[in-house]
Image (cartoon, helix red, strand yellow):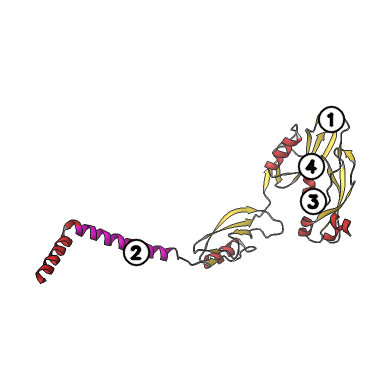
Amino acid sequence: MAKKNQNSDGKLKKFLNHYIVKSVLILMFAVFFIYVGTMLFLRYYTHHGEMLPVPDVTGMMKEEAGKLLESNKMRWQLSDSVYVASVTPGAVVSQNPEPGSKVKENRNIFLIVNAKAPEKVKMPNVVDLSFRQAKSTLESQGLIIGRITHVPDIAKDYVLKQLYRGEEIRRGTPIVKGSEIDLVLGLGLSDERTSVPNLLGNSKSKAHETLTKYFLNFGVIDYDPSVVTRDDSIKAFIYRQRPVSGEIQLGSSIDVWLTVDENQLPAKKEND
């Protein structure tokens, strides 16, 4: 029996000492240790499971915000700039990811800062274009259609003049992005009229879009005492208009009254 065991041990040693078997075993051990080492390295390098809260840097100056992010083991990068009159130039307007988000160490935080001066664009030429073409051209430059006026002219619904603050503005003139451009359109040979749209419950910006589609303008714009701040004026809705219905000539004006008092909503007033 002992001799049989010795023979078995000898065969095993001979097998294990074979150069092919040795090479395979060495390769297996090498792969195993490389795998374990790589996993340990990645776990250390990526700080597996470690998440950090993003601090709120909005309102801070760019340099101050950068130092705070770096002290919290995060990197930062400027992604854009905008102009907001109520914010200090150079201050952070917004950030991505948002404050309080959980991120890994060394994550890039993208910042949008307030520009020192409002962005300007070159005024395009929309004279002799149709209203639809002019609207598209102005909006592509970040400009807004302001007051629309119609005058008798054979070129119906084509732009005869482009105005900025009551004066004609020439192509290529630098102008602040977001400015309103007034248009003078041809009325055609007929005294064309349009129906009065219902603006009740709409914000000023939404009502402006509607009036533009109907080739109408704002007349009197009155805010009631509930509108105090700039945010209030943005949130305010129309609770009264004049005229209310019927038909009026293209280019006419509609007076509106705005409020943030929800009790003034037309539907609620009808139910009262």
Q: Give SS at disc 4.
A: helix
Where does the C terminus fall, quadrant-wise? bottom right
- Mark 1 = which residue? 188
Label 3 or label 2, whichever lies nearer to me, is 2
Circle nearer the N terminus (2, 1): 2
Eyeballing the image, is 112 above or below 128?
Answer: below
Write down the residue under mark 2. 36
Q: Are marks 1 and 4 in contact (CB under 8 Å)?
A: no
Q: CA distance from mark 1 to mark 4?
A: 18 Å
Count residues near mark 2 (Cα–Cα under 10 Å), then give few for <14, some for 14-19, many for 20+: few
Quote the CA–CA distance across marks 2 and 1: 82 Å
User: Cβ–Cβ below 8 Å for labels 3 and 4?
Assistant: no
Q: Which element is circle 1 on?
A: loop
First in sequence, mark 1 or 4: give its number.
Answer: 1
Q: Which residue is mark 4?
A: 212
Q: Residue at x 87, y 58 (%)?
A: 271
Q: Tell me which segment is drawn in magenta.
A: 21-47
Extreme residue in the bottom direction: 2
Among the two numbered marks 3 and 2 on one chain, the one whose residue lies closer to the N terminus: 2
What's under tag 1, amino acid-wise?
Gly
- The dot on residue 44 is none
Q: Is residue 238 left or right of residue 63?
A: right
* Res. 254 visible in picture: yes
**Residue neighbourhood size for the residue with mark 1, other residues' Cα within 10 Å, grouped as few (<14), some (14–19), many (≥20):** some
For marks 3 and 4, give the CA distance.
12 Å
Question: In the rendered image of this protein, does residue 207 appear above or below residue 24?
Answer: above
Between residues 230 and 204, which one lies in front from this camera angle? 204
